[in-house]
Image (tube, helix red, strand yellow):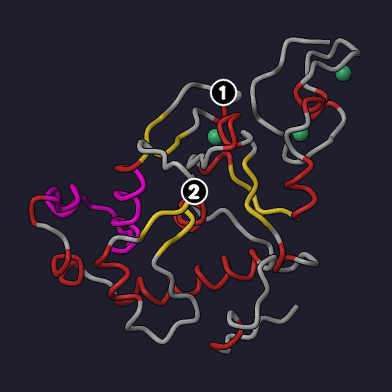
Amino acid sequence: MEVDSNINILNHSDHSQIGLRYYHMVLSFQELEKDYNEEDMHMYTNPNNFPFFVIRKTSTSESILRQHLRWWVRDLSISTELCCEDEYGVCRIPKKLRAKEDGRRELPTSIYKTLIKLPVTWKAKKVCLSWVVCFLDNIQLDIDNEGWDRFQCSHLCLGAGKNLPCLNSKHLVWESASDNQARGSRDCLKKCHCGCGKKLCVANYMHVPSCQLKMIDRQ
Ligand SMILES: [Zn+2]
Ligand SMILES: [Zn+2]
Ligand SMILES: [Zn+2]
């Protein structure tokens, strides 16, 4: 599918076009990061709350936008119990879970105020935290795949095993809605019968990449 950068594209998108909306969020952030600077940040950020990177002047070559977003995500999340295979690491979930947790948070004011001044297609006050993590760590939505505009962001860890918004980028992948919804069947996590020691999900290629919650010790 050819991507139309026309500003109306998001107004005409339907609710299932999650991939399309993510794609436009990335385009908007890419525009924003050319523009967003320390002055923008200081205009709206309480000096006592300046992100650590401003104080330390780290030598990273990342844009100010990426540094600010990284600090923001790190600040609002905690590592939780190890629920995945070692190479995938621990889940990271928001410190303060909301009553109706939908995995979204309001962007830092300085970022939002700068964003709405730009001629970009995606401008939202609230953003899916896992999308921000995908943007920061380059978790790709492959737009050469058919139906990519309806892809969803899956959690290999099944949302820390509890359907929570996990923010570890190694646990995130963009795939079709049906692939996403097929994850987390209890069968995936059972031990394969042949004695290979793998989960059924891995042994039978049920989901690729495989679901990463720890094995359920049942036959
Ligand atoms: Zn996780
Ligand atoms: Zn086996
Ligand atoms: Zn699976």
Q: Position of residue 2 (x, y in %)?
A: 72, 81
> In which quadrant of the rendered image does the N terminus lie?
bottom right
The answer to whether the residue bearing label 1 lies less than 8 angstroms from the nearest atom of ligand 1 is yes
The answer to whether the residue bearing label 2 lies less than 8 angstroms from the nearest atom of ligand 1 is no
**Badge 1 density bin: few <14, some 14–19, many ≥20, Cα 10 Å:** some
Image point (62%, 52%), residue name = 153
Image point (79%, 19%), residue name = 190
Q: Which residues are magenta?
A: 49-74
Instruction: Choose the circle earlier in sequence order: 2 or 1.
Output: 1
Q: Which quarter of the picture shows residue 123?
A: bottom left
Check if residue 60 falls in the magenta segment: yes
Image point (51%, 39%), residue name = 166
Q: Which quarter of the picture shows residue 21?
A: bottom right
Q: Residue under circle 1?
A: 83
Q: Residue under circle 2?
A: 103
Q: Position of residue 177 (x, y in %)?
A: 75, 54
Label 2 amino acid? Answer: Gly
Q: Secondary structure at mark 2?
A: loop
Q: Which quarter of the picture shows residue 186?
A: top right
Image point (45%, 35%), residue name = 92
| Quarter of the rendered image showing ligand 3 | top right
Q: Position of residue 207 (x, y in %)?
A: 79, 39
Point out the residue furthest to the right here.
194
Q: Is residue 175 left or right of residue 49?
A: right
